[in-house]
Image: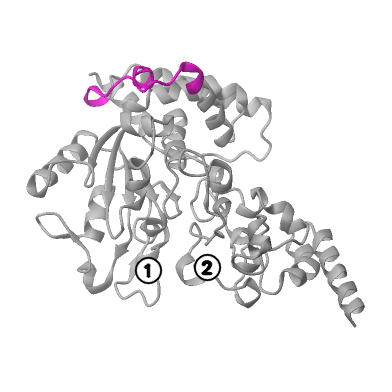
Amino acid sequence: MGIDRIESVKKLFTAQSAKVDTNRGDAYYAELYDRCQARLDELKKLKPLNNRRDFLATIEDEGLERRDFLKWASATTAMLMLPASFTPLVAEAATLMNRVPVVWIELSDCAGNSEALLRSDGPKIDEIILDIISLEFHETLQAASGHQAEKQMEEAIEHFKDKYLLFVEGAIPLGMDGQYGTIGAKGETFVDHLKRVSKHAAAIVAVGTCATYGGIPAAAPNPTDAVGVMDVIKGKPLINIPACPANPSNMVGVILHYVLTGQVPELDSLLRPKFAFGYRIHDNCERRAHFDAGEFVEEWGDEGAKNNFCLYKVGCKGPMTFNNCSIIRYNEGVNWPVGVGRGCIGCSEPDFWDKYAYERPMANAHIKAPTGGVEKTVDEFGLGLLTAAGIGIGIHAAASAVAGKKESEKEEA
C-alpha cells in the first residue's frame, strides 16, 4: 500500500465533530450528500475486516426481504435527521459497516447494554448490523480470557491504530487511586485501562448511563468515586449514549453516522447525539393527550391507571427527560416503560438515580426540569410555570382541570 493510499485510509478514520449549519438549505444538503458519497466510495475500496459476512447476504439468511431493509433504511434516515434523499446512502453505508473496527470494553457496570444487544427475540436489522461489524474485542462475548484476552486487545489496538471506534460500557472508579476496579491478568486499574485503550481510538462512544455520567455506581454516597468517561478522557471525539440500558438503535445510529460522514454526530451540551436525545419524552408520549386534558393516574391501580391516563402525578419524569425511547421503543420496537404503565425514571439524565428514580408524587419531588421547572402540583405548573418555562405543554387543559375542580368544590359547598 503506497503512502498516498495510507493517508487516504487514515483520513477515513479520523473523526471530526459535525459542523452545525443553522441555515440548512438545499445547498447544504447537496454538499453533504456529495461528501458522504465520496466517503462511501473510498470505503468500498477497502476489504471487509477479518472476512466479516456480507450484509445483504446475512439479511437474506435471516429470512428478511430487501423490502424490510429499505423500510429500515428509510426510518433510520429520518432518525438521523437527514432528508429522505439520503436513504440510498444510508442503505449503502449499512452494507459497508464491516469495514469499521470496533473495540468494546466493560468497566464498572452490569453489562446491561451488552445484554440489550444479545437478548433480542428475533432477527432485526439493528442487531444484524451489530453482528457484522468488525467487533475486535468484547470481554462478554469473546472466548479468550486472561493473558490471551490481553494479547487479543493489544493486537487489535496496534493493527487498527487510530482507526477503531472504542465503545465503553461502565463507570470508572477513581477512589483509592483506581483500585476499586482492576481488570485483566495484570490487574490494570479501570482508569489506566481506559486511558491506554482510548489513546489511539478514532472516536469514543460511552454506552449507557454508567459510562456517560457514572450511573448507579456514582449514586450517593459514591464510595468508589465513580465517574463517567467524559470526566476522564479529554481531547478526543466523544459521544455519550445514556439510558439504562441504551437502545441498540441509537448505538447503530452513531456507528452508521460515522461510516456515512466520518464525523461524530451533532451533539448537545452533554455530548449526546441530537438525533436521539433532541426530543423530550413528554413531547412524544402516547399519554400526552391525557396530560393536556387534565387526566392523571392519582394512585397505582385506580381508574386512571386502567384507562392509561398520564403518569405525571405518580412520578413520571417524562417532562424533564430527553430521549427518543417514546419513538423507537424497546424489544423489537414493541413497547417502552410508559407504554406498560411505568413512569419514566429519567435514566438518560445526569444523577438520575439520586434525583429521579422513585415513585412519589411529583408535587413533593422538589426537582427541577432542565427546561424551566416542575416542582409544584400539575395544576400550578400548568397555570403558572409553564408559560415562562416555554417547554411546549398546552396550559388550556390544566386551566380547564382547575376550573372544573373549583366548580365541583362550589357545588359540594
* Residue 400 picture location, percent across and down: 85, 63
Q: Is residue 41 above or below residue 184?
A: above
- Report the residue at 32% width, 50% height from top: 168
Q: Is residue 130 magenta?
A: no
Is label 1 in a helix, a strand or a loop? helix
- Report the residue at 48% width, 52% height from top: 271
Which circle, 2 or 1, is nearer the viewer?
A: 2
Q: Is residue 116 left or right of residue 145?
A: right
Residue denoted by label 1: 218
Q: Is residue 40 above or below residue 326?
A: above
Disc number placed over residue 363 in the picture, else none: none
Q: Is residue 142 something one can see in this rendering?
A: yes
Quick check: marks 2 and 1 in contact, CB under 8 Å? no
> Mark 2 vs mark 1: which is more N-terminal?
1
Q: Is residue 60 magenta?
A: yes
Quadrant of the image occupied by residue 305: bottom right
Q: Which residues are magenta?
A: 49-69
* Residue 66 picture location, percent across and down: 47, 17
